[in-house]
Image: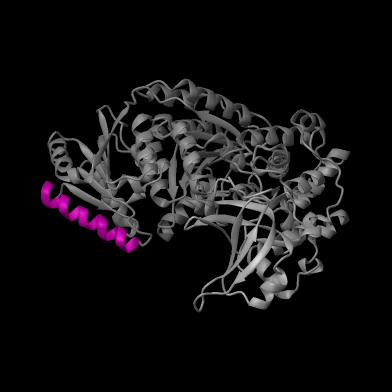
Amino acid sequence: MSRPEILFPLFGDLRGLPGIGDKLAENFAAAGITRPRDLIFTLPGAVIDRRKVRTIKGAALPATLTVEVEIGAHVPPSRKGGPTRIMVRDAECDFQLVFFHAKGDWLQRQLPSGERRIVSGRVELFDGVPQMVHPDHVLPIDRVGDLPDFEPVYPLSAGITQRVMQKAVRAALGRLPDLAEWIDPELKAQRGWPGWAEAMRRAHAPQGTAETQPDFPVRQRLAYDELFAHQLTLALARASVRRQKGRPSRGDGALRAKVLAALPYKPTGAQIRAVQEIAEDMASDRRMNRLLQGDVGAGKTLVAFLALLIAVEAGGQGAMMAPTEILARQHLQALRPLAEAAGVRIEILTGRDKAGERAAKLKALAEGEIDILVGTHAIFQKDVVFADLRLAVVDEQHRFGVAQRLELAAKGLRADVLVMTATPIPRSLALAQYGDMDVSVLDEKPAGRKPVRTALVSAQRYDEVVAHLARAVQQGRQAYWVCPLVEESERVDLTAAEERFRKLRATLGEGVVGLVHGQMPAAEKDAAMADFAAGRTRVLVATTVIEVGVDVPNASIMVIERAEIFGLAQLHQLRGRVGRGSAESTCLLMYQPPLSDTAARRLQILRDTEDGFRIAEEDLAMRGAGDLIGTAQSGLPRFRIADIERQAGLMATAQMDARKLLSDDPQLQGPRGQAARVLLWLTEQDRAIRLISVG
């Protein structure tokens, strides 16, 4: 399938536009603009009011003003390199135009004494005298029409001026095709949105600051187009997974009953609901593609394990994939007692298995003797063959985008897929990242989970904190001490962690303090974790490697050093490592005063609430989407116009609309479907087009 002809003018070479030669095309390319389409998708970020005023008298300076003046005397520079001043008078007062390094004869031609001109630029008071330094525009009276009332201001990069950009955009807008409407007519009417081409033209000619804001209908419409195209891609991905025949897996509940009977507590309502949703998906003949989203300590592991048991009850196998080996081992430790209660065989496969050991596991797996396999992505390597894989649980940690999810499905594994994420994600981002999936949310804490008391402590009170720690250790309690990421360099972090380890060991005694950090060989890391889990060491000094998945119920104190340099979500994750046992737990956020306003607000939010979803919303408001999930591996789309933080509601509407359009017209063959195909080409969602053609 190739790009529709109606879009050719927008996808041609920039050099086809008047005034753009090789050099300018190079400068544009450096800013990511290589076709007319990129120009029209670069909207102005602000607008300058160039409407003419009678006089600058009484204006609140500094201000950008446009006024007709009579030109008086030219006063040459009083010293070398000084400015040339030109005296001018408007309808009511005198002021000066000031030019640096301008040639006198050029100024005489532009601004001849005794004549009238329109000048527009920033007017400021200098020693009580109003001055316009280097006017933006100087025009003869008969050309006043050349100056728009409102001038758009574009984001620029090296070698491109506002004038060049404005001229290029005007030329590109001249190529706008008249495209059929892809937006639902009812929605368009209800929101009062213009058609696409009109919206584009108006977005580039804002009549005042209000028209450059995301909530202005013209901007809203263009943002919606982007979000709709993105959600259409996700909906197509979802449909393509659902079209692949799944295999109904219905369990009799016997194994699940054994596990539930062995638990010392009752599952929460949210856990029961999530397991029901998963069981229904697995029983249908369509492939399950579900996201299990839960806050720290909401009990995702139990839900995932019960889902894996459905696969085993149905006569098949289950797999659980973690992003790192340390986490895979954690999952194994957490699941092993549950597996024993159910009487099923669980094994782990990692890159560290010896050849003989690995071969034995692979044989047992292929013969169906292993019911549940835990590991890193290595469990989907070529030589790993399951007898009958029914369910793959992916512990996400943001390292698994839509592309990888499709890849997993493409392995010919007709298995159902359940993706778990431990980071509560604001709804708008969940839709942007997981719009292709159905979602189950765990929004209750399991019974017996005690709230964690969170306190802010200045770093100057280090000795008090250590004394508190020493008393707790004597009472048999355990603590984490998290060291900051001082710099991007692992080496420096290491020094910080090792230094803290030495100091605490000197105070608390040999054998009491353990150390774990990212640079350690895996075996040492595991040994340090195992010592802590078994209670042989009482305090674990760590870099952020313990952020996820570490489960030591006896640990009831979390000290986070330089808490102000951590992100909110990270602090929330770290705090979630305590409060897992019966003891009262504390999290001490040690900060280095003075705190910036944002850092203070971050730490206060954390002190005030343990609700991960609220924390995530605040984090999004403070940091923006890209930072929130680390754009590099986030699988988050980069939008040119839409603003996910501020247009969350539009994203939800776009998702409903995209899913509805596809259910009414799965092949996008009808008039609106055909228009939507053009939108997918326009927004470069080519992957989506391939998904339609595959279907």
Vertical relation: 490 (above or below) 416: below
The image quarter in which residue 658 lies: top right
498 falls in the magenta region: yes
Where does the image place residue 132, in percent across and percent down from the top left? 59, 59
Between 205 and 552, which is closer to the camera in this rendering?
Answer: 205
Between 278 and 165, which is closer to the camera in this rendering?
Answer: 165
Image quadrant holding the C terminus, namely: top right
In percent of the image, x 68 and y 43: which residue is there? Answer: 208
Between 128 and 541, which is closer to the camera in this rendering?
Answer: 128
Q: Is residue 248 left or right of residue 320?
A: right
Q: Is residue 238 left or right of residue 439?
A: right
Vertical relation: 42 (above or below) 262: below
Q: Is residue 109 left or right of residue 426?
A: right
In percent of the image, x 40 and y 57: which residue is there? Answer: 352
Residue numbers of the magenta segment: 490-510
Between 636 and 624, which is closer to the camera in this rendering?
Answer: 624
Q: How is the image coloured?
A: one colour
Image quadrant holding the N terminus, namely: bottom right
Where does the image place residue 601, in percent across and percent down from the top left? 38, 38
253 falls in the magenta region: no
Q: Taking the image as drawn, is residue 356 in sight?
A: yes
Where does the image place residue 613, in percent across and percent down from the top left? 47, 32
Q: Main secondary structure of the magenta part?
A: helix
